[in-house]
Image (tube, rainbow, N blue to C red):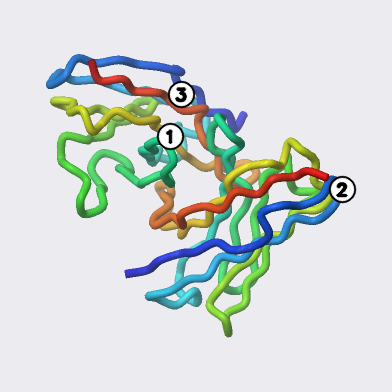
């Protein structure tokens, strides 16, 4: 299966740590990449694998992977981290990309 | 730094063909990357459409494969999307993006700003 499953919504208190997860069979073969999207804006690449981040993305964002589950962790969440987060991977059987359904992160 | 810009009609009639172009600036499209189209219906999540290599090789989403074609024009440093037999369900913001990848997986960066296409008579 090429589906990636994410929790629809997650909340975190300001300054606390939050983990956003993504599950799917393709994650056993490929690492996930993660994207942040704020209202009315294009998605922004946040991280791939554990720590391949573009310049400008704070190191409070980290990734991890185990079995069929990938995780994005925000350590010390800030108000500006409130956004939708999408995971992405590749389906090896058909060689096409796939996105998770997205997680809406609320920072309280 | 590489920038991408989508362009094309913002309104397409039902059963017609959606055509968009992604112009690449700040770098050559003829490098070792795949170039990708992604869409997002209003209020919904991201959907991967397909990708093309500068050689013309393509991969498509199984759910759209029968209706979609992606092409590349190296002389103009751009790539294009065509989606035929459109319906209201194809109304979405369409994004283009550069794909970085290796044997461990891939990621999309940067993205264009996106262009809204509405399917309506």
List the residue tagged with mark 2: B15
Q: Quadrant of the C terminus of chain A?
A: top left
Please tell me in which quadrant of the rendered image residue A9 appears.
Answer: top left
Query: What's the residue at 54%, 32% (across, down)?
Result: B45
Query: What's the residue at 40%, 47% (across, down)?
Result: B104
- Residue A66 position, x and y percent, is 34, 26
Judging from the image, mark 2 belongs to the subunit labelled B
Relative placement, left or right, of B79 versus B83 is left
Query: What's the residue at 26%, 39% (across, down)?
Result: A50
In the image shown, does B60 or B113 lie closer to the viewer? B113
List the residue tagged with mark 3: A23
Judging from the image, mark 1 belongs to the subunit labelled A
Q: Marks 2/1: CA distance? A: 32 Å
Q: Quadrant of the N terminus of chain A?
A: top right
Residue found farthest to the bottom: B75
Do the residues indicated by labels 1 and 3 lie within the same chain of the protein?
A: yes
Judge the density around disc 2: few (<14), some (14-19), many (≥20) Cα neighbours within 10 Å.
some
Judge the density around disc 3: few (<14), some (14-19), many (≥20) Cα neighbours within 10 Å.
many
Q: Marks 1/3: CA distance? A: 9 Å
- Give the mark toward the camera: 2 or 1: 2
- Residue A65 position, x and y percent, is 33, 30
Do the residues indicated by labels 2 and 3 lie within the same chain of the protein?
A: no
- Give the mark toward the camera: 1 or 3: 1
Relative placement, left or right, of B45 versus A20 is right
Q: Residue A87: which disc?
A: 1
Q: Marks 2/3: CA distance? A: 36 Å
């Amino acid at each position: 299966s090429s589906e990636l499953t994410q929790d629809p919504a997650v909340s975190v208190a300001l300054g606390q740590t939050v983990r956003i997860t993504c599950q799917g069979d393709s994650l056993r073969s490929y690492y996930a990449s993660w994207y942040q999207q704020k209202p009315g804006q294009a998605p922004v690449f946040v991280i791939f694998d554990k720590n391949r981040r573009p310049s400008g993305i704070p190191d409070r964002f980290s990734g991890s992977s185990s079995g069929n589950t990938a995780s994005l962790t925000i350590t010390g969440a800030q108000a500006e981290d409130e956004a939708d987060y999408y995971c992405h991977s590749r389906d090896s059987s058909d060689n096409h990309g796939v996105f998770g359904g997205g997680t809406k992160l609320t920072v309280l | 730094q590489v920038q991408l810009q989508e362009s094309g009609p913002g309104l397409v009639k039902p059963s017609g063909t959606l055509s968009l172009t992604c112009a690449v600036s700040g770098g050559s499209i003829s490098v070792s990357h795949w170039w990708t189209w992604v869409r997002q219906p209003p209020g919904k999540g991201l959907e991967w459409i397909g990708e093309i290599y500068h050689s013309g090789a393509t991969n498509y989403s199984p759910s759209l494969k029968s209706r979609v074609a992606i092409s590349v024009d190296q002389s103009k440093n751009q790539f294009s999307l065509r989606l035929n037999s459109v319906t209201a369900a194809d109304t979405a913001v369409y994004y283009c993006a550069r794909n970085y990848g290796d044997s461990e997986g891939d990621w999309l960066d940067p993205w264009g700003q996106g262009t809204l296409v509405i399917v309506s008579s």
